[in-house]
Amino acid sequence: MLRVKARYLVDGTRDADLQLAWAWLIQESERAGAGALAVLLLDHVRTLGTRGIMHAGAARTLERDRSIGIQNSNARIHLIAERARDNPRFDRPVPILAVWPTDDFIAKIDRLNDGPLCVAWWLEKDIATWTAAHGPANLATGVQHETSSISDPIVRVALENVDQGVNRGTGISHPMDKSLAVNTFKLLRDRGHAFTAAEVQVFAMQHNWDPRGAAALAEVAQAILDRRAIRTHSKWAGQQRKDVYAHWKERAAGDTTDQSYGP
C-alpha cells in the first residue's frame, strides 16, 4: 500500500520562500515534538544563518551540536547531513525541511518516515524526478504539482508485477529480480508498448523503492529500449510464465482474480 504524506516545495533561491519554509518547520516541529533540517553540506546551514533565514547563532549551534531547541517549546530541530554517520533516527513521524537537495538525496530523506516533508530547491531540475513521483504542493502558492503516471495500462500492470516480485529495499540486485525486470521490459518492447526510463524510475519511487534501486531499474529499461545486451544469470533467464502477457492484459482490463502471474 502506498504511503500518503504531506509534501511541499518552495523556491530555495528566494529568501522569502526559505523563511516561509523555516517557519513551517518550526511550527510543525512544535506539533510533532521534533523536526529535522536536511542538508547536503554543512556549509548550507551556515548559509541559512548568513542569509538571515535562521538566526546566525542558531545556525552555528545546529552545525556544532546537530540539534537546537525551539524557543518556548520542548521540541528540538535536528540536523541531517548526507555524509554524516550519526544522523538522527525517529520513532515517530516528524517534519523535515530539505534545503537544496539532489533527487537522490531527497529520495532518501523521503523514505525516512511518514512525517510531512518540505523541499527547498536550488534548481528545479535537481528534484524533477521526486516532483514527478509525488506531486508536492507549493508551500507559498498552494499550487499542486501533477504526478507522473504510466499511461499504458499494460505497462503499468507489468511494472506492478515487477514491484510485487522484488524486495524494494534491494531492488533488482538479485539475479532473479534483474532477470524478471529484463524479461518484462523485453516483452513490453517486443509487443509494441511505449515506455521511458524516466517513467519507470518515477513509478519505482512512487512505490517506495530505494533510490538506487529505482535508478537501476530505469537503467535496465533504457538498455532494453536501446537493444543493448544485459547480462543475466542463465538459471533465471526466460523464467516468466508463458501466458504472462495474457495475464497482464486481463488485469489491465480489470480482471484481478489471478495476480500470481510472476516468474
Image (spheres, helix red, strand yellow):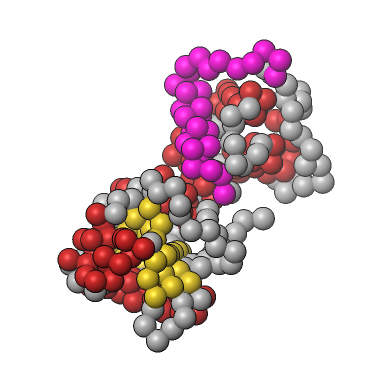
Q: Position of residue 221 (x, y in %)?
A: 51, 29
The residue sitting at the bottom extreme is: 72
Q: With respect to residue 20, does 146 lie above or below?
A: above
Q: With respect to residue 209, does 92 lie above or below?
A: below
What segment carries the magenta color?
Answer: 208-236
The answer to which of 218 and 51 lies nearer the viewer is: 51
Q: With respect to residue 204, does 187 lie above or below?
A: above
**Lateral position of residue 169 relative to residue 46, left or right:** right
Report the residue at 81% width, 42% height from top.
Answer: 258
Q: Quadrant of the N terminus?
A: bottom right
**Lateral position of residue 240 relative to residue 51, left or right:** right
Whether residue 228 is in magenta: the answer is: yes
Whether residue 1 is visible, yes or no, is: yes
Q: Position of residue 19 (x, y in %)?
A: 27, 73
Whether residue 8 is visible, yes or no, is: no
Q: Position of residue 57 (x, y in %)?
A: 24, 71
**Lateral position of residue 192 relative to residue 69, left or right:** right
Write down the quadrant of residue 78 in the picture.
bottom left
Report the residue at 48% width, 72% height from top.
Answer: 34
Write down the quadrant of residue 263 in the picture.
top right
Q: With respect to residue 59, does 181 lie above or below?
A: above
Tally of numbered discs:
0
Q: Position of residue 248 (x, y in %)?
A: 70, 37
